[in-house]
Amino acid sequence: MTGKEIRRSLPLFPIGPVMELTDLTARQIRYYEEHQLVVPARTKGNQRMFSLNDIDLLLEIKDLLDQGVNIAGIKQIFAMKEEEKNREIASKQPTKKQLTDQELRKILRSELLGENRLKQTNLRQGDMSRFFH
Amino acid sequence: MTGKEIRRSLPLFPIGPVMELTDLTARQIRYYEEHQLVVPARTKGNQRMFSLNDIDLLLEIKDLLDQGVNIAGIKQIFAMKEEEKNREIASKQPTKKQLTDQELRKILRSELLGENRLKQTNLRQGDMSRFFH
DNA sequence: ACATTATGTTAGAAAATATAACATTGGTTT
DNA sequence: AAACCAATGTTATATTTTCTAACATAATGT
């Protein structure tokens, strides 16, 4: 299922919460972007919006830097990982349609609301968790 | 395990992303807060910060309103759910220590970094998913 | 007809984020 | 040692986002 990937790549977080979650400064995050290690989405007003995947990347960057790898090295490592992933995918799926963020959000919401509708009158707690994992 | 609950109650989302995820206007969200249906955390600068649980609540509110329940009714329903939950919990745990947001974030990060440290040199993708679900 | 409820709209202030420039620190290189 | 460079800090100024508060409005209940 691709729902998981959709959720993980949804640009939901502005830089503030990302700073707190990663313990990186805004300067660091922007610097990494400058070097293309992360490429967060942008709002209409040009504010960065990070997905869970982006946050993963930032945590990996932090780890690698802590181990002494420099930016150039990290770039190489990430490139390798990209290749790997492409190789895995290439062996299976034919190419799929590209979705805009807007479309992604629509899908996401309808997934969730669909579920809610089924259990609407009972008192169990809602479940946002399907946005993630 | 309480890690899940911690993650679900972490205030991570400012109002903008919440609007997109829920299809509610800022006015609506603030109005619901005015009536105590959601009580998002606040940043130092007084900006609302929503957790996954808060977003669940908003989606439930939306659903109930769509079904014709008014705010007062929703308040009652939520109160009932609270009671239920308390009854369930009361039968088990003794009261636990209350944590500040700061502390929660610290815990969260150390959980995550701890995991990362174990797989630091292999090239698998990082995993933010343990923040959620 | 009048009140109330839920939401829209607008104005002005404060907070968060943007870019860009310059500063600093710790290693490299010559 | 002097000069570099990489990674990050700091500061200034602009733009975007969010805040509260007030007033407007459409639909509903009385």
Image: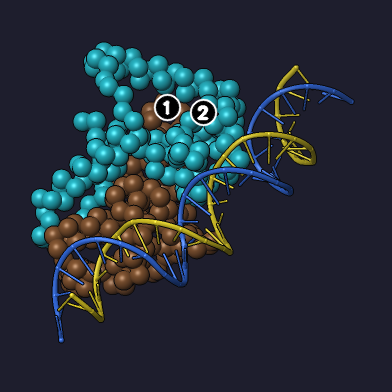
Chain colours: A brown, B cyan, C blue, D yellow
Q: Nearer the viewer, residue B66 or A33?
A: A33
Query: Residue B51: x, y in percent?
Result: 40, 38
Q: Nearer the viewer, mark 1 or mark 2?
A: 2
Q: Is residue B34 visible?
A: yes
Q: Is residue D6 left or right of residue A104?
A: left
Query: Residue B61: x, y in percent?
Result: 51, 33
Q: Is residue A38 visible?
A: no
Q: Chain of mark 1?
A: A
Rendered residue at 33%/42% (across/down): A129
Q: Secondary structure at mark 1?
A: loop
Quarter of the image that includes the N terminus of chain A: bottom left
Q: Is residue B74 left or right of residue B82?
A: right
Q: Secondary structure at mark 2?
A: loop
Query: Residue B42: x, y in percent?
Result: 46, 36
Among the 4 quarters of the image, the one containing residue A76: bottom left
Query: Does residue B63 lie above or below D2 as drawn?
Result: above
Q: Chain of mark 2?
A: B
Query: Residue A15: x, y in percent?
Result: 40, 54
Q: Which residue is mark 1?
A: A122
Among the 4 quarters of the image, the one containing residue B87: top left
Q: Which amino acid lies under the numbered mark 1 shown in the image of this protein?
A: Asn
Query: Does residue B58 lie above or below A8 as drawn?
Result: above
Rendered residue at 20%/42% (across/down): B110
Q: Nearer the viewer, residue A58 or D12?
A: D12
Distance of mark 1 from mark 2, alpha carbons?
A: 18 Å
* Mark 1 nearby-residue class (10 Å; few <14, some 14–19, many ≥20): few
Q: Nearer the viewer, residue A97 or B95?
A: B95
Judge if badges 1 and 2 mark residues of a common chain: no
Looking at the rendered structure, which numbered label has been put on residue B37? 2
Query: Does residue A11 lie above or below B28 as drawn?
Result: below
Rendered residue at 58%/44% (across/down): B25
